[in-house]
Image: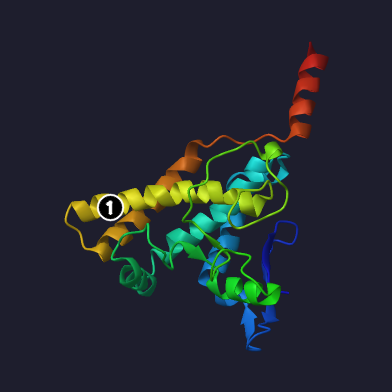
Amino acid sequence: MLNAFYSREDGNLNFFHAPDPVNGQTVFSADSGEVTSHECGHAILDALRPSFLNAWSPDPAAFHESFGDCMSILMALQDDATVAKCVDQTGGDLSKDNCVANNGENMGIVINHKAGKNVTGGDYGRTARNDFSWSDPSDLPAKTTYDKLSSEPHSFSRLWTGSFYDVLKGIADREMAAGKSPKDALRAAGDEGLRIYANLFKTARRAISPIARWRRRWSVRRAE
């Protein structure tokens, strides 16, 4: 299968492969730095906030997926070759289609080839370039489409990823306005984005699962 996942129970990251039905080439999910960064992101977030995986609300599950995608973006901005390609594609304007925003291009192409149509929105698995707005997941459809949010975590995650990407774009724009080259501006955005994420989880709320919340309330009542 063409997939990858983090397993807390096994303490590992798992990667797979599948043939492209169009050209017959075997594609390995671990060949993608974005995919490996994404799965490492799951492991890092689980270590920092283990209760996020136990939450019943769709929001923490979607945030978990977004954290992985944002890690992919931040790691891409640490790579000189990727940044250079992004500059060639955009001139530093992250509102344009680019390799930093697009996640898992090699997998996305095969997914679309297997489906026989464009089901991801482009030659990628997901992209951070979007203008989605938050809606109550209970009011959203369960079926995933690339052009609309659904309650499925990978789909709903694009809301958080797009918001963070907008922050990175704003930082890059600010740096270029201050006189930095597009390449240096993108690297600066990546560095500041890493600091933002690191500082965020020093104070981020630790989610409590419904079962844990019920047990806590029951303990308080019994004590009273």
Q: Residue at x 68, y 75 (%)?
A: 116
Q: Name the image quarter holding the C terminus.
A: top right
The colour scheme of the drawn protein is rainbow
Q: Which residue occupies the foreground of this view, 91 or 218?
A: 91
Q: Check the image and name the residue furthest to the top.
A: 224
Drawn side of residue 213 relative to residue 200, left or right: right
Residue 64 placement (x, y as % from top left): 61, 50
In the image, residue 34 above or below residue 219: below
Q: Give the amino acid at mark 1.
A: Asp
Q: Position of residue 75 (x, y in %)?
A: 45, 63
Residue that extends furthest to the left in the rendered view of this protein: 179
Task: Residue 183: name its quadrant.
Answer: bottom left
- Give the quadrant of the N terminus: bottom right
Nearest to the observer: residue 204 or residue 73: 73
Up the image or down, 205 lies above or below 62; here it is above
Which residue is at 60% across, 64% downward?
120
Residue 88 coordinates in the image, percent (x, y) = 31, 72
**Badge 1 element:** helix
17 and 157: which is toward the camera: 157
Q: Is residue 192 above or below residue 82?
A: above
The residue tagged 1 is 173
Q: Is residue 167 left or right of residue 122?
A: left
Q: Nearer the viewer, residue 50 or 146?
A: 146
